[in-house]
Image: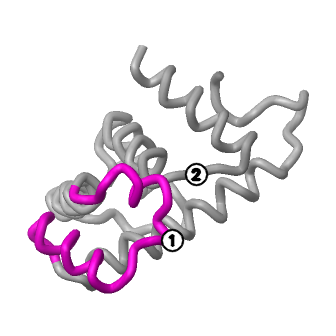
């Protein structure tokens, strides 16, 4: 039930061209719930099988960073400057480099979502359930 809601929000974000850090976190959690991430990544071309503990640590770090942001920062990451990054890093127990890395990964995911939103799929349907 919760995954259906997340899929619907992702479809709406795709359609409207909006993709927030809240959407990014929901996607990360959906992938995590899908099963052992290492096995999933090992099936993709070009990916070596990463250590499961390392993936779990990275996921927890990313989640802590996003949860240390204000709602406004999650919805409008472009407002996050140097002082906000320092505050987020302190609040999440990470470094400013970790915050920068997460924001860069978010931007990559946002570009991908935008591209998927523009792409036409067979039957005019999105590549995931609504």
Nearer to the camera, 22 or 124: 22
Indicate which disc residue 78 carries.
1
Above or below 87: residue 51: above
The residue lying at 19 percent from left, 73 percent from top is: 87
Instruction: Give the quadrant of residue 72.
Output: bottom left
Give coordinates of residue 38: x percent, y percent. 32, 54
Above or below 86: residue 129: above
Q: Secondary structure at mark 2?
A: loop
Our reading of the magenta stretch's main secondary structure is helix
Q: How many marks?
A: 2
Instruction: Give the quadrant of residue 99.
Output: bottom left
Magenta stretch: includes residue 73: yes
9 on left or right of 26:
right
Stretch in magenta: 68-94
Nearer to the camera, 96 or 77: 77
Residue that badge 2 annotates:
19
Crowding near the residue tagged with mark 2, few <14, some 14–19, many ≥20 C-alpha atoms within 10 Å: many
The residue lying at 24 percent from left, 52 percent from top is: 67
Indicate which disc residue 42 carries.
none
Give coordinates of residue 3: x percent, y percent. 44, 24
């Amino acid at each position: 039930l919760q995954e259906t809601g997340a899929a619907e929000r992702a479809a709406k974000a795709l359609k409207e061209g909006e993709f927030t850090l809240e959407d990014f976190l929901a996607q990360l959690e959906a992938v995590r719930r899908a099963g052992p991430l290492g096995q999933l990544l090992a099936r993709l071309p070009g990916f070596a099988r990463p250590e499961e503990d390392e993936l779990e640590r990275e996921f927890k770090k990313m989640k802590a960073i996003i949860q240390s942001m204000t709602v406004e920062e999650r919805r409008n990451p472009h407002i996050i400057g140097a002082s906000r990054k320092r505050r987020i890093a302190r609040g999440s127990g990470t470094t400013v480099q970790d915050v920068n890395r997460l924001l860069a990964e978010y931007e990559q995911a946002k570009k991908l979502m935008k591209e998927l939103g523009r792409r036409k799929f067979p039957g005019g349907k999105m590549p995931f359930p609504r």
